[in-house]
Each structure stands twice: as C-alpha cells, then as structure tokens.
Amino acid sequence: MPSPTASFELPAPSGFIRRQVDDDEWNARVDLAACFRLIAKYGMSDLTYNHVTSRVPGRHDQVLINPYGMLYSEIRASDLYKIDLEGREILKPEVPYDQNPAGFVIHGAVHAARPDVGCVIHTHTRAGMAVSAMKCGLLPLTQTAMRFYGRVSYHDFEGPAINLEERERLVANLGRTDAMILRNHGLLTCGRSVAEAFNNMYWLEMACKAQVDAMAAGTELNLPPESVARLTAELYTPGVRRTYGELEWPAMLRAVGREDASFRQ
C-alpha cells in the first residue's frame, strides 16, 4: 500500500533558508543543487539514494547534504540540510524528509580527513557497480580511463555504510586520491569544488561504461604501454593544463537551467 506521503507535493520555498545563510553559502547551495540535477540528467542517480555533500564555505566542520527521500532531479538550494561532520543537524530544510546516516558515515569521514576536499560524490551506477565487481578494477583501456591511471583507490565492501568504525579504513584507502572504487558497491569522487568533483565523477563513469562495453564485445583488448598510460595521467593532472571542471561549470549550470531553473530556489 502506498504511504500517506506518496503523492506529497514539495512545498514552495518560503525564503526562510535563504534568510538564514550568507551569500557564499547560498551560492554553494545553488552549485550543489545543480550537481544533483546533473547527476540525474546524465543517468547517475539511484532513485532517492546516495549522497553528494559540499563543505560550507569558511567552515571546515559543516557540510550541506541532501534529504533522504527526494529525487536528485527535484532538489533545490533551500532543500539541503546543513550538518556537522558527525551528522548533527545545524539547519533543517522545509521538506518532510530526514537525512540518511550513511551519508555522514562516508562523506563526513572524507571531509574530516581531507581539508582540501570541498565536495564528495557517491554513486551506484550500473557501469560503476559492474567495474567495482571486477577483480581487475579500472583498466587503462581509453584516454578517459588513463586520466585515472595510478590515481584511483579501492575500498573493500564491508556491508551498507552504517558502521562508524569503517570510516578510518575508508579514508586510509582513499589517501590523497580524488577517485575511489568501492568494491562490489559503486564509485566515489571528490574535489576542491562541486565543479571539480562532478567532473571527476562524470569521467570516471564514462571510463567504467567504456570498459564494460569493450569487455562485453568479447574481442581481445588492446592495453597501451604503461609509459603511455602514465604520461596521459600526468597530462591530466590539475595545474598541468587546467583545473578539472571549472571551465565547463558555467555551461553545466546553463544546461540544467534551461531544463528547470528551480534548483536555484
């Protein structure tokens, strides 16, 4: 039987949240809401599950996180929870949904261990889960995959992410990388900004899709020499050419805005 809230319409934002935060935080909320819309747009969402978090500007101990029960395609800037790194509520949005503890188990651990990280994205995509189940991990089959050569970490599956003791092992495995394959689980990326973290996730997802397609073709795979893979990864290093995602981000905002500008509310 459907729940009493199955047909619930989201309330229009009253402006309460906007009045509680400064311009920097509001802009961070808009970027994060846009990121959710983009993840949905490119087929990387998982119904109402998974999380994206963004650090509150100027506050290393506070993050913004999505409510547990909203589709990524409907999240707005005012719908985000503000919590501390232990999951304690600081500012609750005007929507009838709580937050999922798994969000701060993984994301809170990364934000606490990595002051350089401004945003963390976790997905359960079909291609990401498929590669996470492969003993070989991510192979340098394409230029896109070679971007991550030697720069993707792995964390073994320990069950649904609700065990606080797992946090230490997860961040130890993540190390200083910005991309992680959670074995038998999914993908995780991070970045200094929402734009950078999304860019990392988009291309990691594309690399996984290409690998699944190539392996499914049933033909012999062509792996480049290690020297070529390492050179390609080096040329993709932020700073060698440009920071990941920053050039593309205004276009990404325009793309979601043309479809539905309500993410800015």
Image (cartoon, rainbow, N blue to C red):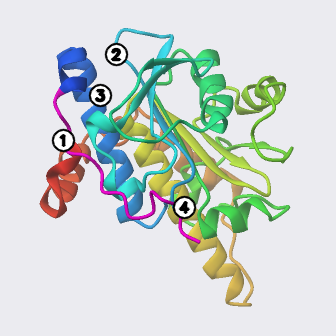
Where residue 57 is drawn, which disc sits there? Answer: 2
First in residue order: circle 1 vs circle 2: 2
- Magenta stretch: give its range: 1-15
Q: Which residue is mark 4?
A: 46
Secondary element type, mark 3: helix
Amino acid under label 4? Asp
* Residue appearing at x 42%, y 41% in the figure: 96
Quick check: marks 1 and 2 in contact, CB under 8 Å? no
Give the camera-side residue of 117 and 63: 63
Q: Is residue 36 above or below residue 237?
A: below
Task: Find the distance from the CA under tag 2 to the CA under tag 3.
Answer: 7 Å
How far across and how far down the image is residue 177, in percent? 63, 33
Is any atom of residue 239 visible in this view?
A: no
Q: Is residue 91 above or below residue 147?
A: above
Is 223 covered by the magenta stretch? no
Where residue 28 is drawn, which disc sits there? Answer: 3
Task: Find the distance from the CA under tag 3 to the CA under tag 1.
Answer: 11 Å
Q: Which residue is mark 1?
A: 264
Badge 4: how crowded within 10 Å, few (<14), some, or many (20+)? some
Amino acid under label 3? Ala
Quick check: marks 2 and 3 in contact, CB under 8 Å? yes
Quick check: marks 3 and 1 in contact, CB under 8 Å? no
Left or right: residue 7 versus residue 120 is left
First in residue order: circle 4 vs circle 3: 3
Task: Find the distance from the CA under tag 4 to the CA under tag 3.
Answer: 23 Å
Task: Find the distance from the CA under tag 4 to the CA under tag 2.
Answer: 28 Å
Where residue 60 is drawn, which disc sits there? Answer: none
Amino acid under label 2? Pro
